[in-house]
Image (tube, helix red, strand yellow):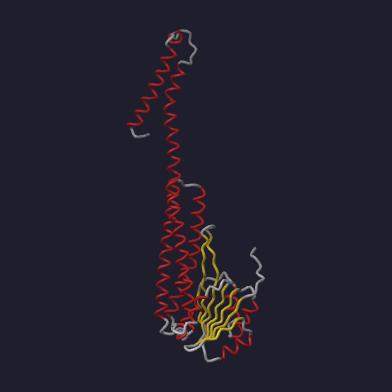
Amino acid sequence: MGTIRTDRTSVFAVAYDETRICETEDPDSAKLESLKQAPTNLWVNLDGLHETDRVRAIGSCFGIHPLVLEDILNTTERPKIEDFDDYIVIIIKMLDYDEETNELYSQQASLIIGNSFILSFQEGGDNRFEPVKVRLRLNSSRARRAGPDYLAYCMADLVVDNYFVVLDKIAERIELLEENLVRNPTPETLKILHKLKSNLIFLRRSLWPTREAVNRLINEDSPFIRDATKPYLRDLFDHTIHAVDSMETFREMVSGMLDIYLSSVSNKLNQIMKLLTIIATIFIPLTFLVGWYGMNFKYMPELESPWGYPAVMVAAGTIVVAMLVLFRRKKWI
């Protein structure tokens, strides 16, 4: 059961064009309506989806379909893109990897691109798109001169760049596991490997749809995606391909490491069985020898000999040494 959040969602609006920028914290519906009517581009961002009324209020102000708002509030949605008459909806996953717990965490981000506005809804409240706001404040930035589609590219680029941070952390974990796997494979290593495999499967479910969504943005003839923005989207598509390739490589490495683990455990068991087999083989003739002289026949001449016991001990020792020499020559030990 998840934790019930009681903190207030964070909303800010940025109206901007090439010459000016106006930031508004926590705007009400009336303020949003006036900003929407202004002859500037508008970005409205909401951090935290637990206050559903605020999400629906923003959606109502910009004429967003109720089914789209349901997709935004349903944080288990698959990354996708949907094209409507008045806007484009993009849903992507923001990922983080905790190296201590070996856990992969996901948050959903939804972008709605209109002709002169962009709405962004983040599941978490960590201001993930703050660097985009910083870029907007620069008078010479391309984000100020371009439209909402370029701002959407900047946000998607932030998300995809963070995929590489996650992949780098997973790569470091894989390198450490490889060393432990060769030296001393343990059941704990197997648990970590299975967790890594699950994380990579989850990562795959996020990366492949994101790649498809970006490719669709490039190829679709949408009035909300300007031709000037498409080269940047193609660069973003290349990044997603690189991330997918890295992820697939790591999946193959983890699968190979599972095979190495099973082979190492099997080899270790074989070594133990080999040692036990050698010990048992050495004791077979010794058992025969002591069993032979354990018979209680009256006329066994060795039983009365004062040299009988030392002779048996010497014979037993000779057998052991001879067998060890034979095993060494055969390279069994």
Q: Is residue 263 above or below residue 14?
A: above
Q: Which quadrant would residue 226 be assigned to in this image?
A: bottom left
Taking the image as shown, residue 219 lies to the left or right of residue 117, namely: left
Q: Is residue 231 left or right of residue 133?
A: left
User: For the point 45% across and 75% down, which residue is it?
Assistant: 214
Nearest to the observer: residue 265 or residue 299: 265
Q: How many numbered discs, if any?
A: 0
Q: Is residue 48 above or below residue 198?
A: below
Look at the image and tell me in which quarter the N terminus lies.
bottom right
**Quadrant the C terminus occupies:** top left
Q: Residue furthest left?
A: 329
Give the x, y percent position of residue 243.
43, 67
Q: State the residue at coordinates (41%, 78%).
A: 232
Compare residues 132 and 45 and report the one nearer the observer.
132
Where residue 4 appears, as percent x and y from the top left, is 66, 67
Instruction: Report the residue at 48% width, 89% height from top.
Output: 19
